[in-house]
Amino acid sequence: MTITSLLAYWTRDHLVANGFIGLNLLGALLLGMLVGYERSYQGRAAGMRTYGLVCMAATALTAFSGFAPLWFGGTVLSAPVDPTRVVQGVVSGIGFLCAGVIMKDGLSIRGLNSAASIWAVAAVGVLLGVGFYAAAISLALLAGLSMSALRRLEARLPGRSTLDVQLCFRAGHMPRLDELSAVAVARGHQIVRESLVINVANGRPVWRFAVVSIDRAKAASPTMLAEEMTVAEGIESFSITPVRN
């Protein structure tokens, strides 16, 4: 490896290509954030960071394939190797790894951002492997920014939060969904009716459902809800769990 061969990776054409890919990554982050904010506003598990990371990684894996003549410093491979097949193997393998870090506990889903960041790091490796060093640095910096700064930005923007609520009613008490919905709305929450699960334990009805805050800044906090449920007639026991992502 000589200095001349190393400089082949930093020619004018390579710098233009890296700059083009870097701008595409920035645009992908912004577009992914736009889509992710809608999901975050609806109280879903995947939010701005997850969508931004996945969009950037997909862009990186797609954009670099358009500059095949510049791969590996523009040199000709000595063997007829198709790098796109290698990329397919990397993406498939990382997909299984990402699935392993996602855990579901009730309505809470954890590990989505970790899985997206792992996939983004895989894209960084691909870009580094084909010699797009500046683009790889851009993707790494943007991924790190989305994992740290966007958490604070997402928390400050208007949005909704989700609670996993389980109510155990006293024997003989017959709860009504419409009445519970009215109580929830009065406290700034909406019951997600399709999430309702009804069980019976020792002759007592047990209801489990998700509630989404209409505006998380104005809705009653889990502590306030717990104080009211403690003295509520007909409720024997309860649990309130914030849905995490």
Image (cartoon, rainbow, N blue to C red):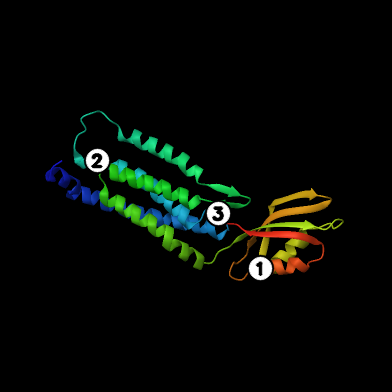
Q: Earlier in the sequence, mark 3 or mark 2?
A: 3
Residue 139, x across and y down, in percent: 34, 52
* 35 on left or right of 125: right
What residue sits 49% from the left and 56% below the top?
A: 36
Q: Is residue 91 above or below residue 212?
A: above
Q: Amino acid at mark 3?
A: Ala
Tell me, yes or no, whether the two marked residues, 3 and 2, touch with CB atoms within 8 Å: no
Q: Nearer the viewer, mark 2 or mark 1?
A: 1
Task: Label 3, secondary structure: give it.
Answer: loop
Q: Is residue 100 above or below residue 168?
A: above
Residue 152, x across and y down, in percent: 46, 65
The C terminus, quarter of image: bottom right
Q: Is residue 146 above or below residue 7?
A: below
The residues tagged by marks 3 and 2 sit, at their Cα atoms, a distance apart of 38 Å
Task: Label 1, secondary structure: give it.
Answer: helix
The N terminus, quarter of image: top left
Residue identified by numbered label 1: 223
Q: Amino acid at mark 2?
A: Trp
Q: Residues within 10 Å of mark 3 (few under 14, many from 20)?
A: many
What residue sits 38% from the left and 57% below the top?
A: 144
Could you say which disc has been placed on residue 45 in the image?
A: 3
Q: Nearer the viewer, residue 98 or 175?
A: 98
* 103 on left or right of 132: right
- Looking at this rendering, what residue extends furthest in the right direction? 172
The residues tagged by marks 1 and 3 sit, at their Cα atoms, a distance apart of 22 Å
Residue identified by numbered label 2: 71
Q: Amino acid at mark 1?
A: Thr
What residue sits 54% from the left and 67% below the top?
A: 158
Number of numbered discs on residues: 3
